[in-house]
Amino acid sequence: MGKRDEWIAKYADDLKNKCGMTPDMDLLTKVTIGCGPAIYNADAQTVAGSQESELETVKNNFLIKKLGLSDGPELMEAINKAIETYGSSERNKYRAVIYYMLTKHFGRESVYG
C-alpha cells in the first residue's frame, strides 16, 4: 500500500465516521489524485474552516475553476455546510474530504469522469 492509498483510506474513514457518509471510493480516489502533492503537505492537506481567505481559495480554485460552477452565495453556503458536516471542532479537515463532499453536493462527479 502506497502513501496515497494510506491517505485515501484515512479520508474514507473520516467520511464514514465523522461525516456520516458512505464514500464512493472511485470518486474519492480521483478527487485525492486531483489534489496533487498537496495531500503530502501538512499545511496544504487541510482546510482551515475558520479562515475566510482559505474558504475563498476553496471557492475560487476548486468550485469555480475545477468544477466549473458560477460564483454565487450558494458556493460559500455549500463550503460552510461541508465544514459543518465534517465538524467545526474537528481540527484536521482534510482538503480531499471537503472537495469530495462539495463534488457530491453539486453533482459534479462527471468532472472526474
Image: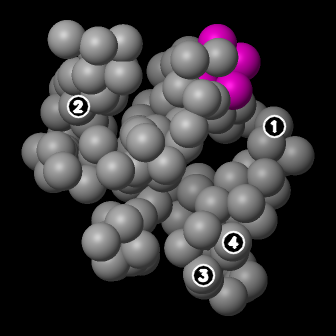
Q: Identify the disc placed on residue 51.
A: 1
Amino acid marked by disc 2: Ala
Q: Say if mark 1 contacts mark 3, CB within 8 Å.
A: no
| Residue 18 visible in the displayed image | no
Marks 3 and 2, the one that precedes in the sequence: 2
Residue 9 found in image quarter: top left
Residue 94 placed where, x, y %? 50, 29
Q: Residues within 10 Å of mark 2 (few under 14, many from 20)?
A: many
Residue under pointer 4: 65
Q: Residues within 10 Å of mark 4 (few under 14, many from 20)?
A: few
Q: Say if mark 4 contacts mark 3, CB within 8 Å.
A: yes
Q: Residue at x 26, y 54 (%)?
A: 27
Q: Say if mark 1 contacts mark 4, CB within 8 Å.
A: no
Give me the C-alpha separation between circle 3 and circle 2.
25 Å
Give me the C-alpha separation between circle 1 and circle 3.
23 Å
Query: Which residue is at the far right?
Result: 53
Marks 1 and 3, the one that precedes in the sequence: 1
Amino acid marked by disc 4: Lys
Q: Residue at x 65, y 17 (%)?
A: 41
Range of magenta residues: 42-46
Front label number (4 vs 2): 4
Residue under pointer 3: 68
Secondary structure of the magenta portion, mostly?
A: loop
Amino acid marked by disc 1: Gln
Would residue 2 appear left or right of 20 to someone viewing this image? right
Q: Residue at x 60, y 29 (%)?
A: 37
Residue under pointer 2: 12
| Residue 60 forms part of the magenta stretch | no
Image quadrant holding the N terminus, namely: top left
Amino acid marked by disc 3: Gly
Residue 90 placed where, x, y %? 49, 21
